[in-house]
Amino acid sequence: MQIDLGLLNAVIAVAKAGGFREAARATSSNPSRLSDAVRRAEQQLGVRLFHRTTRTVVLTEAGEILLQRLLPAMSEVESALDAVNGFRKTPAGTLRLNVPVSAARLVLPGIVPAFLARYPDIQLEITAESNVIDIFSAGSDAGIRYDENLEQDMIAVPIGPRRQRYAIAASPSYLDRRGRPEHPRELLRHACLRGKFASGVLPEWVFEKNGEVVKLKPSGPLIVNIGAGVDLAVETAMAGIGIIQLFEEWLRPHFASGALEPILEPWWKDFPGPYLYYPDRRLVPTPLRAFIDFIREYQQYSLK
Protein backbone atom coordinates (compact mmCIF):
# COMPACT_ATOMS: atom_id res chain seq x y z
CA MET A 1 0.00 0.00 0.00
CA GLN A 2 1.35 3.44 -0.98
CA ILE A 3 0.16 6.76 0.40
CA ASP A 4 1.33 10.33 0.07
CA LEU A 5 3.28 11.52 3.14
CA GLY A 6 1.51 14.85 2.85
CA LEU A 7 -1.82 13.12 3.51
CA LEU A 8 -0.38 11.41 6.59
CA ASN A 9 0.92 14.74 7.86
CA ALA A 10 -2.59 16.13 7.52
CA VAL A 11 -3.98 13.22 9.57
CA ILE A 12 -1.38 13.87 12.29
CA ALA A 13 -2.11 17.60 12.36
CA VAL A 14 -5.87 17.09 12.72
CA ALA A 15 -5.42 14.41 15.39
CA LYS A 16 -3.02 16.56 17.44
CA ALA A 17 -5.17 19.68 17.18
CA GLY A 18 -8.47 17.91 17.72
CA GLY A 19 -10.20 19.54 14.76
CA PHE A 20 -9.81 20.89 11.24
CA ARG A 21 -9.96 24.58 12.14
CA GLU A 22 -7.43 24.20 14.93
CA ALA A 23 -5.12 22.15 12.72
CA ALA A 24 -5.40 24.69 9.90
CA ARG A 25 -4.41 27.44 12.31
CA ALA A 26 -1.43 25.45 13.58
CA THR A 27 -0.18 24.54 10.10
CA SER A 28 -1.01 27.79 8.28
CA SER A 29 -3.36 25.85 6.01
CA ASN A 30 -7.14 25.98 5.69
CA PRO A 31 -9.82 23.62 7.04
CA SER A 32 -11.21 22.54 3.69
CA ARG A 33 -7.77 21.57 2.38
CA LEU A 34 -7.06 19.49 5.48
CA SER A 35 -10.51 17.90 5.35
CA ASP A 36 -9.90 16.91 1.74
CA ALA A 37 -6.46 15.48 2.61
CA VAL A 38 -7.91 13.38 5.44
CA ARG A 39 -10.72 12.15 3.18
CA ARG A 40 -8.19 11.08 0.51
CA ALA A 41 -6.05 9.34 3.16
CA GLU A 42 -9.11 7.41 4.32
CA GLN A 43 -9.94 6.47 0.72
CA GLN A 44 -6.43 5.22 0.04
CA LEU A 45 -6.29 3.26 3.31
CA GLY A 46 -9.82 1.96 2.97
CA VAL A 47 -10.77 2.75 6.60
CA ARG A 48 -12.31 5.65 8.46
CA LEU A 49 -9.77 7.45 10.64
CA PHE A 50 -12.01 10.03 12.34
CA HIS A 51 -15.50 10.22 13.75
CA ARG A 52 -16.82 13.61 12.64
CA THR A 53 -19.69 15.61 14.10
CA THR A 54 -20.53 19.29 13.78
CA ARG A 55 -18.63 19.93 17.03
CA THR A 56 -15.95 17.25 17.39
CA VAL A 57 -13.40 15.31 15.40
CA VAL A 58 -12.27 12.16 17.21
CA LEU A 59 -9.99 9.34 16.08
CA THR A 60 -11.57 5.97 15.39
CA GLU A 61 -9.93 2.82 16.74
CA ALA A 62 -8.15 2.40 13.40
CA GLY A 63 -7.05 6.03 13.57
CA GLU A 64 -5.69 5.56 17.10
CA ILE A 65 -3.65 2.53 16.05
CA LEU A 66 -2.34 4.32 12.95
CA LEU A 67 -1.33 7.39 14.95
CA GLN A 68 0.49 5.35 17.60
CA ARG A 69 2.66 3.74 14.91
CA LEU A 70 2.86 6.79 12.68
CA LEU A 71 4.19 9.40 15.10
CA PRO A 72 7.53 7.68 15.83
CA ALA A 73 7.97 6.84 12.15
CA MET A 74 7.32 10.42 11.00
CA SER A 75 9.66 11.70 13.69
CA GLU A 76 12.38 9.46 12.25
CA VAL A 77 11.66 10.77 8.75
CA GLU A 78 11.98 14.36 9.98
CA SER A 79 15.22 13.52 11.79
CA ALA A 80 16.66 11.88 8.68
CA LEU A 81 15.81 14.88 6.51
CA ASP A 82 17.20 17.26 9.09
CA ALA A 83 20.44 15.28 9.30
CA VAL A 84 20.88 15.83 5.57
CA ASN A 85 20.03 19.51 6.07
CA GLY A 86 23.04 19.74 8.38
CA PHE A 87 25.34 19.22 5.37
CA ARG A 88 24.07 22.37 3.67
CA LYS A 89 26.30 25.41 3.77
CA THR A 90 23.34 27.50 4.95
CA PRO A 91 20.63 26.06 7.25
CA ALA A 92 17.22 25.87 5.64
CA GLY A 93 13.68 24.95 6.58
CA THR A 94 10.76 26.29 8.57
CA LEU A 95 10.88 27.36 12.20
CA ARG A 96 7.55 27.82 13.98
CA LEU A 97 7.45 29.83 17.21
CA ASN A 98 4.54 30.49 19.56
CA VAL A 99 5.11 33.66 21.58
CA PRO A 100 3.26 36.13 23.82
CA VAL A 101 2.16 39.35 22.17
CA SER A 102 4.55 41.22 24.46
CA ALA A 103 7.50 39.22 23.11
CA ALA A 104 6.46 39.89 19.51
CA ARG A 105 6.30 43.58 20.34
CA LEU A 106 9.26 44.06 22.68
CA VAL A 107 11.75 41.19 22.24
CA LEU A 108 11.69 39.82 18.70
CA PRO A 109 12.06 43.08 16.71
CA GLY A 110 15.65 43.31 17.92
CA ILE A 111 16.38 39.71 16.92
CA VAL A 112 14.32 38.57 13.94
CA PRO A 113 15.56 40.94 11.18
CA ALA A 114 19.23 40.13 11.87
CA PHE A 115 18.48 36.40 12.15
CA LEU A 116 16.68 36.29 8.80
CA ALA A 117 19.43 38.34 7.18
CA ARG A 118 21.99 35.76 8.32
CA TYR A 119 19.84 32.75 7.37
CA PRO A 120 17.89 33.66 4.22
CA ASP A 121 16.88 30.03 3.58
CA ILE A 122 15.02 29.72 6.89
CA GLN A 123 11.34 30.63 6.93
CA LEU A 124 10.16 31.88 10.32
CA GLU A 125 6.49 31.47 11.26
CA ILE A 126 5.48 33.29 14.43
CA THR A 127 2.13 32.95 16.19
CA ALA A 128 1.61 35.67 18.81
CA GLU A 129 -1.19 35.23 21.33
CA SER A 130 -1.98 36.02 24.94
CA ASN A 131 -3.36 32.67 26.10
CA VAL A 132 -1.00 29.93 27.29
CA ILE A 133 -1.33 26.82 25.13
CA ASP A 134 0.52 23.57 24.52
CA ILE A 135 2.75 24.91 21.77
CA PHE A 136 3.83 21.51 20.52
CA SER A 137 0.34 20.10 20.04
CA ALA A 138 -0.31 23.32 18.11
CA GLY A 139 2.50 22.45 15.72
CA SER A 140 5.20 24.85 16.94
CA ASP A 141 8.88 23.94 17.30
CA ALA A 142 9.57 26.22 20.24
CA GLY A 143 7.93 28.91 22.33
CA ILE A 144 8.71 32.00 24.34
CA ARG A 145 7.34 32.05 27.87
CA TYR A 146 8.02 33.61 31.23
CA ASP A 147 9.29 31.59 34.21
CA GLU A 148 5.92 30.77 35.68
CA ASN A 149 4.65 29.29 32.42
CA LEU A 150 7.57 27.02 31.51
CA GLU A 151 6.52 23.41 30.97
CA GLN A 152 8.32 20.40 32.43
CA ASP A 153 10.99 18.50 30.50
CA MET A 154 11.89 21.60 28.52
CA ILE A 155 15.19 23.31 27.84
CA ALA A 156 15.02 27.06 28.46
CA VAL A 157 17.32 29.63 26.87
CA PRO A 158 17.23 33.29 28.00
CA ILE A 159 15.96 35.66 25.33
CA GLY A 160 15.55 39.42 25.60
CA PRO A 161 16.01 41.58 28.72
CA ARG A 162 16.61 39.58 31.90
CA ARG A 163 14.60 41.91 34.12
CA GLN A 164 11.41 43.69 33.18
CA ARG A 165 8.92 45.88 35.06
CA TYR A 166 5.23 46.65 34.96
CA ALA A 167 4.79 50.42 34.71
CA ILE A 168 1.79 52.49 35.78
CA ALA A 169 0.91 55.63 33.84
CA ALA A 170 -1.78 58.08 32.81
CA SER A 171 -1.99 61.20 30.71
CA PRO A 172 -1.01 64.49 32.37
CA SER A 173 -4.54 65.79 31.73
CA TYR A 174 -6.09 62.87 33.63
CA LEU A 175 -3.71 63.31 36.56
CA ASP A 176 -4.31 67.07 36.68
CA ARG A 177 -8.02 66.36 36.82
CA ARG A 178 -8.12 63.38 39.20
CA GLY A 179 -4.90 63.76 41.19
CA ARG A 180 -1.63 61.83 41.31
CA PRO A 181 -1.74 58.68 43.46
CA GLU A 182 0.96 58.38 46.10
CA HIS A 183 0.13 54.82 47.20
CA PRO A 184 -1.15 51.88 45.10
CA ARG A 185 -4.34 51.56 47.17
CA GLU A 186 -5.39 55.00 45.95
CA LEU A 187 -5.88 53.39 42.52
CA LEU A 188 -9.12 51.92 43.84
CA ARG A 189 -10.57 55.44 43.60
CA HIS A 190 -9.36 55.94 40.03
CA ALA A 191 -10.51 54.89 36.57
CA CYS A 192 -8.20 52.03 35.55
CA LEU A 193 -7.86 50.41 32.13
CA ARG A 194 -7.51 46.66 32.56
CA GLY A 195 -6.59 43.64 30.48
CA LYS A 196 -7.94 40.10 30.58
CA PHE A 197 -6.58 36.81 29.32
CA ALA A 198 -8.35 34.71 26.69
CA SER A 199 -9.56 32.52 29.57
CA GLY A 200 -11.48 35.52 30.93
CA VAL A 201 -9.20 35.97 33.96
CA LEU A 202 -8.43 39.58 34.89
CA PRO A 203 -4.96 39.57 36.48
CA GLU A 204 -4.32 41.56 39.63
CA TRP A 205 -2.14 44.64 39.64
CA VAL A 206 0.83 43.83 41.87
CA PHE A 207 3.14 46.38 43.51
CA GLU A 208 6.17 46.01 45.74
CA LYS A 209 8.29 48.43 47.75
CA ASN A 210 10.72 47.74 50.60
CA GLY A 211 9.25 44.29 51.14
CA GLU A 212 5.64 45.48 51.15
CA VAL A 213 3.51 43.78 48.49
CA VAL A 214 0.16 45.23 47.43
CA LYS A 215 -2.26 43.34 45.17
CA LEU A 216 -5.27 45.12 43.72
CA LYS A 217 -8.21 44.51 41.43
CA PRO A 218 -9.01 48.05 40.32
CA SER A 219 -12.04 48.93 38.23
CA GLY A 220 -12.58 51.26 35.33
CA PRO A 221 -14.32 52.01 32.07
CA LEU A 222 -12.35 49.68 29.76
CA ILE A 223 -11.31 46.00 29.74
CA VAL A 224 -9.42 44.66 26.72
CA ASN A 225 -7.97 41.30 25.71
CA ILE A 226 -4.32 41.09 26.70
CA GLY A 227 -2.65 41.08 23.33
CA ALA A 228 -4.86 42.40 20.56
CA GLY A 229 -6.51 45.06 22.71
CA VAL A 230 -3.42 46.54 24.34
CA ASP A 231 -2.86 49.29 21.77
CA LEU A 232 -6.47 50.41 22.24
CA ALA A 233 -5.91 50.64 26.00
CA VAL A 234 -2.77 52.73 25.45
CA GLU A 235 -4.61 55.11 23.13
CA THR A 236 -7.43 55.39 25.68
CA ALA A 237 -4.95 56.24 28.43
CA MET A 238 -3.30 58.89 26.27
CA ALA A 239 -6.75 60.38 25.64
CA GLY A 240 -7.07 61.05 29.37
CA ILE A 241 -9.67 58.38 30.22
CA GLY A 242 -7.78 56.39 32.84
CA ILE A 243 -4.66 54.76 34.30
CA ILE A 244 -2.90 51.88 32.54
CA GLN A 245 -0.51 49.16 33.71
CA LEU A 246 1.76 47.67 31.06
CA PHE A 247 5.34 46.62 30.34
CA GLU A 248 7.69 49.55 30.94
CA GLU A 249 9.31 49.06 27.52
CA TRP A 250 5.91 49.32 25.85
CA LEU A 251 5.11 52.65 27.51
CA ARG A 252 8.58 54.21 27.42
CA PRO A 253 8.13 55.96 24.02
CA HIS A 254 4.99 57.62 25.38
CA PHE A 255 6.88 58.76 28.46
CA ALA A 256 9.49 60.33 26.20
CA SER A 257 6.85 62.13 24.13
CA GLY A 258 4.99 63.37 27.21
CA ALA A 259 1.75 61.69 26.16
CA LEU A 260 1.85 59.58 29.32
CA GLU A 261 3.26 60.35 32.75
CA PRO A 262 4.70 57.57 34.94
CA ILE A 263 3.22 57.31 38.43
CA LEU A 264 4.04 55.26 41.54
CA GLU A 265 7.42 54.33 40.03
CA PRO A 266 8.99 53.29 43.38
CA TRP A 267 6.27 50.60 43.55
CA TRP A 268 6.79 49.14 40.08
CA LYS A 269 7.30 45.41 40.39
CA ASP A 270 10.01 43.76 38.36
CA PHE A 271 10.11 40.14 37.19
CA PRO A 272 12.48 37.81 35.28
CA GLY A 273 12.67 38.16 31.52
CA PRO A 274 11.38 35.54 29.06
CA TYR A 275 12.90 32.29 27.82
CA LEU A 276 12.90 30.42 24.54
CA TYR A 277 11.98 26.85 25.38
CA TYR A 278 11.91 23.64 23.40
CA PRO A 279 11.68 19.86 24.06
CA ASP A 280 14.59 18.07 25.67
CA ARG A 281 15.45 15.74 22.81
CA ARG A 282 18.62 14.45 21.20
CA LEU A 283 18.19 15.96 17.75
CA VAL A 284 17.13 19.59 17.52
CA PRO A 285 15.88 20.62 14.03
CA THR A 286 18.49 22.61 12.13
CA PRO A 287 16.44 25.86 11.86
CA LEU A 288 15.79 25.79 15.62
CA ARG A 289 19.43 25.05 16.38
CA ALA A 290 20.45 28.04 14.25
CA PHE A 291 17.99 30.25 16.14
CA ILE A 292 19.19 29.02 19.54
CA ASP A 293 22.83 29.70 18.63
CA PHE A 294 21.88 33.11 17.27
CA ILE A 295 20.02 34.27 20.39
CA ARG A 296 22.83 33.03 22.64
CA GLU A 297 25.23 35.14 20.59
CA TYR A 298 22.77 38.06 20.70
CA GLN A 299 22.39 37.79 24.49
CA GLN A 300 26.15 37.84 25.01
CA TYR A 301 26.52 40.85 22.76
CA SER A 302 23.63 42.75 24.37
CA LEU A 303 25.04 42.22 27.88
CA LYS A 304 28.39 43.80 26.98
Image (spheres, rainbow, N blue to C red):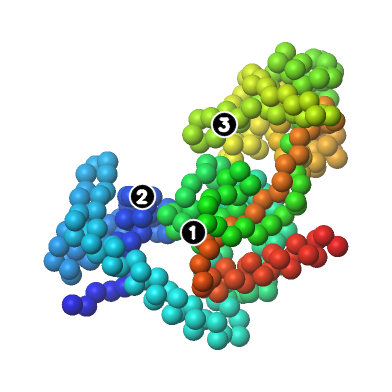
On-image quarter of the N terminus: bottom left
Q: Which mark is residue 246?
A: none
Kind of residue at badge 2: Arg
* Lower position in the chain sequence, tag 2 or tag 1: 2
Q: Secondary structure at mark 2?
A: helix
Nearest-to-viewer mark from 2 and 3: 3
Whether residue 36 sits left or right of residue 228 in the image: it is left
- Is disc 2 surrounded by few (<14), some (14 to 19) or many (20+) residues within 10 Å? some
Q: Which mark is residue 196?
A: 3
Residue drawn at (63%, 67%) of the image: 291
* Lower position in the chain sequence, tag 2 or tag 3: 2
Say above or below: 82 vs 269. below
Q: Quadrant of residue 181?
A: top right
- Is disc 3 surrounded by few (<14), some (14 to 19) or many (20+) residues within 10 Å? some
Say above or below: 294 vs 199. below
Kind of residue at badge 1: Ser
Q: Which residue is mark 2?
A: 21
Nearest-to-viewer mark from 2 and 1: 1
Q: Quadrant of residue 293?
A: bottom right
Say above or below: 264 vs 89. above
Say above or below: 190 vs 104. above
Residue drawn at (45%, 76%) of the image: 79
Residue drawn at (80%, 38%) of the image: 254
For residue 62, say whether it is visible: yes
Residue drawn at (70%, 29%) of the image: 206
Q: Nearer the viewer, residue 156 or 139?
A: 156
Q: Which mark is residue 140?
A: 1
Q: CA distance from mark 2 to mark 1?
A: 16 Å
Q: Nearer the viewer, residue 67 or 123?
A: 67
Residue 302's spot in the image, x, y percent? 80, 61
Kind of residue at badge 3: Lys
